[in-house]
Amino acid sequence: MNRKQSIKEIANHILTLNVTHPTRVGVSGITASGKTTFANEVAEEIKKRGLPVTRASIDDFHNPKVIRYTQGKESARGYYEDAHDYTAFKERLLKPLGPNGNLQYETISHNLKTDIPVHNEPLMAQTNMVLIVDGTFLLKKDVEHLFDYKIFVDTDFEIARKRGAKRETEAFGSYEEAEKMFLSRYHAACKMYMDEHNPKECADVVFRNSDLANPELIFQERM
């Protein structure tokens, strides 16, 4: 199955869900697995079907620096445990769009560049809206139940590291430095996530993304 067909197949599954509130789709995967690109592709496919779609990312719900770097700027465990504000993420984005929610939601709580909290006027969702959120650690056990459909973008660590290091070369000054950071911080944190939460297990579909042109889909059989 080629990439376009795979995206259509996943959109079909999402649109068969029978919920009475906006459909909350969570896209997880290790850093540089291709989550954001994939989530954008699914969003575009659903928009083509005539439904309202909102894109969001856990990366707009960071903790301030003083919390993020408590365990050190290069700490893998610090990145895993302290990077994101899950309380704001749940209370301001996911819960308002769920059962008995008031449909008033926000897609950002913190400006990463300025390190300043953000308090925007809440948006009002239509009940047929599809929310597609991407984020590395989205399927942690205390968060995953707030998604109506869960996707894990599964990319080989080595392939993701090379893609990520290429992407972050400018930020870290060289490809080698970027690769080191992926090994020691980002992907070390991802391994903690995989070990502690086994996100593939709770995903409705695993999207194997090592070969970008020819991904593989594995749908979970739910009893």
Image (spheres, helix red, strand yellow):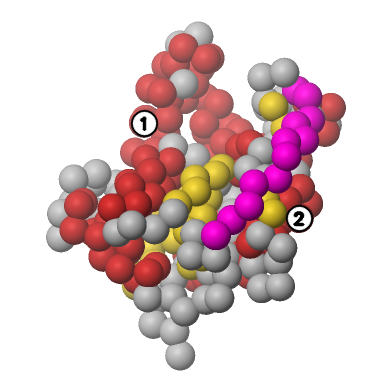
Q: Is residue 43 above or below residue 139?
A: above
Using the rendered image of the protein, determine whether residue 124 is visible from the camera's viewpoint.
yes
Using the rendered image of the protein, determine whether residue 80 is visible from the camera's viewpoint.
no
Q: Residue at x 72, y 63 (%)?
A: 102
Q: Residue at x 66, y 73 (%)?
A: 99
Residue 25 pos. (x, y %): 50, 60
Q: Secondary structure at mark 1?
A: helix
Residue 2 pos. (x, y %): 15, 54
Q: Quadrant of residue 154?
A: bottom left
Residue 43 pos. (x, y %): 38, 50
Q: Is residue 44 above or below residue 6?
A: above
Q: Residues within 10 Å of mark 1 (few under 14, many from 20)?
A: some
Using the numbered discs, state the Cα–Cα distance from disc 1 to disc 2 in whole angstroms: 33 Å
Instruction: Give the residue number, with chain letter if any, for mark 2.
Output: 91
Q: Which span is picked out in magenta? A: 115-126
Disc 1 + disc 2, Cβ < 8 Å? no
**Mark before the other along the chain sequence, 1 or 2:** 2
Kind of residue at badge 2: Glu
Q: Nearer the viewer, residue 219 or 111?
A: 111
Q: Residue at x 47, y 59 (%)?
A: 130
